[in-house]
Amino acid sequence: MPAGTIYNHETVTLDGEEYADCEFRDCRMVFSGGAPPAFDSCRFDGCEWKFEDGAANTLAYLKVVWSVGGKAPVQALIKEITGGGGR
């Protein structure tokens, strides 16, 4: 994607994309489970983050793991994602 692009009230497909110095205003950010996107110095204002297809399936799986007593591994994953994993 072109650097410095401003996205305004758009649906933005994230899989495998790279964004640099972009601004996203009130956008619908959609990740479907492909390659993770890359963001460099981007700004987000009022965006909605959506998970579809494979990404939605992964979240549904984590809910199942949690509901059958697998809270510890899900919590460990959340700590890793948020940087609270003690590394």
Image: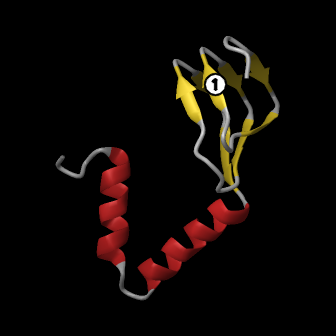
Question: Residue 24 location in percent, x, y?
Answer: 68, 24
Left or right: residue 79 versus residue 36 is left
* Residue 69: image location, x then y, percent: 36, 86
Say which residue appears at 32% left-offset and 53% top-offset.
Answer: 80
Q: Which residue is nearer to you in this view: 4 or 46? A: 4
* Residue placed under numbered mark 1 in the picture: 19
The quadrant holding residue 4 is top right
Image height check: is 19 above or below 30?
above
Asked if 39 appears above or below 80 in the picture, the reply is above
Tell me which colouring the rendered structure shows: secondary structure
The amino acid marked with disc number 1 is: Tyr
Q: Residue at the top extreme?
A: 4
Residue extending farthest to the right is: 10
Which percent across, then down, holds residue 49? 65, 45
Q: Residues within 10 Å of mark 1 (few under 14, many from 20)?
A: some
From the viewer's perspective, is 70 left or right of 49? Answer: left
Quadrant, the N terminus: top right
At 30% across and 63% down in the image, what residue appears?
76
Secondary structure under tag 1 reads strand
- Residue 34, position in %: x, y? 66, 53
- How many discs appear? 1
Q: Up-down: is 27 above or below 56?
A: above
Q: Residue furthest left?
A: 86
Instruction: Please report the residue visible at 57 percent of the width from the left and 68 percent of the height from the top.
Output: 58
Q: Which residue, as the protein is rendered here, is positioned at the far bottom?
A: 68
Quadrant hosting residue 5: top right
Residue occupying the point 66% across, 41% down: 16
